[in-house]
């Protein structure tokens, strides 16, 4: 196992305790096990950052040690400050190395599509991640999809992926991954611009008409008085 984090069981709880831990460069965490147990822990922030900076990031399998226990785990969820993006709390989940798990991994397009190179289109990455199932040791960093042969308005779907041995793609095979879009024609752009100008001009005319009707009513009212 490449990464190992040393933790301690946490005995004190509450917001004040969590703030104290963060001031000291620590953070609260909870380890969830396969047998419905949960262990509150305290660990160093920098150790979590090390995991996040690794090739697999949140999908990294690592070891957490506390007391005399050693557990293989993954990050289940990170709680962040919505303003500063600071990590406030971590949830880990115990992993059995001999049992397949499901995770989401990125899809990376490679090559230059014919539809971009010679036909003036552009690449639209529709689906950025797919769900896979495999043993923890076989989790790939990403899956590549070759777009070189795609022409305008052609696409590649999940079913076109060629995952490595031991990896099964769970996402629906008809899910579109990459589409080569055609650029808007010049006349389409002009028409859209003209429609916007007409829409903007129409509103003041309506207001002007309404004001004119109100003025006429006022004049008639004055004559009667």
Image (cartoon, helix red, strand yellow):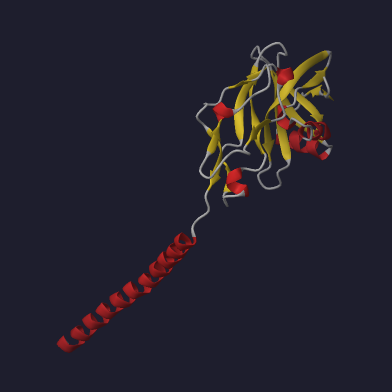
Residue 24 x, y percent position in the rendering: 84, 37
Task: Identify which residue is drawn at 61% across, 33% down.
Answer: 129
In this rendering, position of residue 177 left or right of residue 54: left
Among the 4 quarters of the image, the one containing residue 97: top right
Among the 4 quarters of the image, the one containing residue 2: top right
Total residue callouts? 0
Among the 4 quarters of the image, the one containing residue 33: top right
Residue 54 x, y percent position in the rendering: 79, 32
In this rendering, position of residue 97 left or right of residue 103: right
User: Quick one: quadrant of the C terminus?
Assistant: bottom left
In front here: 108 or 113? 113
Residue extending farthest front:
118
Residue 52 x, y percent position in the rendering: 76, 34
In front here: 118 or 198? 118
In front here: 224 or 120? 120
Residue 101 x, y percent position in the rendering: 65, 18
Rendered position, 158 above or below 111 = above
Task: Identify which residue is drawn at 44% across, 62% down.
Answer: 192
Rendered position, 103 above or below 81 = above
Residue extending farthest left:
224
Task: Identify which residue is drawn at 60% across, 26% down.
Answer: 131
Task: Identify which residue is drawn at 76% across, 17% down.
Answer: 72
């Amino acid at each position: 196992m490449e990464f190992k984090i040393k933790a301690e069981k946490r005995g004190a709880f509450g917001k004040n305790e969590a703030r104290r831990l963060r001031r000291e460069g620590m953070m609260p965490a909870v380890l969830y096990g396969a047998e419905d147990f949960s262990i509150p822990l305290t660990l160093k922030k920098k150790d979590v950052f090390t995991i996040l900076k690794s090739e697999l990031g949140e999908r990294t399998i690592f070891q957490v040690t506390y007391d005399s226990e050693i557990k293989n785990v993954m990050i289940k969820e990170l709680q962040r400050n919505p303003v500063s993006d600071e990590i406030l709390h971590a949830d880990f989940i115990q992993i059995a190395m001999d049992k397949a798990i499901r995770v989401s991994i990125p899809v990376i397009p490679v090559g230059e599509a014919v539809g971009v190179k010679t036909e003036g289109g552009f690449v639209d990455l529709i689906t950025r991640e797919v769900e896979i199932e495999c043993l923890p040791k076989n989790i790939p960093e990403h899956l590549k999809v070759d777009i070189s042969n795609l022409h305008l308005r052609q696409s590649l779907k999940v079913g076109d992926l060629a995952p490595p041995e031991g990896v099964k793609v769970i996402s629906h095979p008809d899910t579109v991954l990459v589409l080569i879009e055609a650029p808007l024609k010049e006349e389409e752009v002009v028409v859209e611009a003209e429609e916007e100008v007409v829409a903007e001009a129409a509103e003041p005319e309506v207001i002007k008409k309404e004001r004119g009707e109100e003025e006429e009513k006022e004049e008639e009212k004055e004559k009667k008085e």
